[in-house]
Image: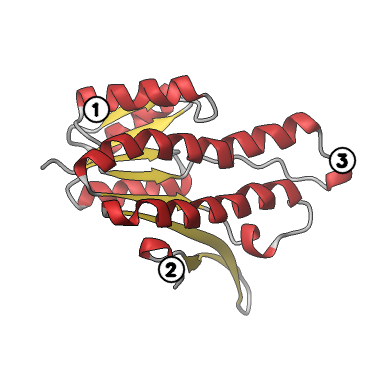
């Protein structure tokens, strides 16, 4: 069976790094981003027969259409990575309602919609794996990121519950919570990306 991985937010940052790793492991990739040209550039750098798609994850009809196109052109998606996300850092009293809504829609609702779309095929196959990219701020909070923290914290609760729903279908759901680790050397400050927490398979914690 073909190994097909859809990476939402795969054109940059963590999503792009994940896509590169999955390509090395032999997966056929769907690189999904709002900007199709950027997605195509990222897919092209991977070589092989990987494809690019444009999608706004906050819009259910676009998510559904994207999954239909991926299945038509790549095959059934059996690995899903949700790395699409935005932040609008600001103190809550200064945050515009539109910015609150856009963060919740992209960071939380978007992952819910892609997981829902992926479930149909994964349940039929009785296998699949989902990784949702959260943030350490979703666990600990951070000044000026109350809305972003809420969206990422909600993603943790959603993923825990979904993992319990689909474990009997042999579908795994995990969350990773990246954070910044500052190493103060003699002359330089280096920033390391550390995965500080992960939800283990079948809804447990590890």
Mark 2 Cα-neighbour bin, 10 Å: few <14, some 14–19, many ≥20: few
- Measured Cα–Cα span from mark 3 to mark 1: 43 Å
Kindly identify the residue that appears in the image at 42 percent across and 62 percent down. 203
Q: How many numbered markers are drawn?
A: 3
Kindly identify the residue that appears in the image at 65 percent across and 59 percent down. 137
Q: Name the residue under label 3.
A: 94
Residue 183 placement: quadrant? bottom right
Q: As drawn, is 21 to the left or to the right of 13?
A: left
Residue 173 placement: quadrant? bottom left
Image height of 73 relative to 202, above or below: above
Q: Which of marks 3 and 1 is in front?
A: 1
Q: Provide the secondary structure element on which disc 2 rests.
A: loop
Depth check: 59 or 86 in front? 59
Q: Name the residue under label 1.
A: 71
Mark 1 Cα-neighbour bin, 10 Å: few <14, some 14–19, many ≥20: some
Asked whether disc 2 touches disc 3, contact meaning CB atoms under 8 Å apart, the reply is no
Kindly identify the residue that appears in the image at 37 percent across and 20 percent down. 65
Q: As drawn, is 46 to the left or to the right of 159?
A: left
Colouring style? secondary structure
| Numbered tag placed on residue 105 in the rendering | none
């Amino acid at each position: 069976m073909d190994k097909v991985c859809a990476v939402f937010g795969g054109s940059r940052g963590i999503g792009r790094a994940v896509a590169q790793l999955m390509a090395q492991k032999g997966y056929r990739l769907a690189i999904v981003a709002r900007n199709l040209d950027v997605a195509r550039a990222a897919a092209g750098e991977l070589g092989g027969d990987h494809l690019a798609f444009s999608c706004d994850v906050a819009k259910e009809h676009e998510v559904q259409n994207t999954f239909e196109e991926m299945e038509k052109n790549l095959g059934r998606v059996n690995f899903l990575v949700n790395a699409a996300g935005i932040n609008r850092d600001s103190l809550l009293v200064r945050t515009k309602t539109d910015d609150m809504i856009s963060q919740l829609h992209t960071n939380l609702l978007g992952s819910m919609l892609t997981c829902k779309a992926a479930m149909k095929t994964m349940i039929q196959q009785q296998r699949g794996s989902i990784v949702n990219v959260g943030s350490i701020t979703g666990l600990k909070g951070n000044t000026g990121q109350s809305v972003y923290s809420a969206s990422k914290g909600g993603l943790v609760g959603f993923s825990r519950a979904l993992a319990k729903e689909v474990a009997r279908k042999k579908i795994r759901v995990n969350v990773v919570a990246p954070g910044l680790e500052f190493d103060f050397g003699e002359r330089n400050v280096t920033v390391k990306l550390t995965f500080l927490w992960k939800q283990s398979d079948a809804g447990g914690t590890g």
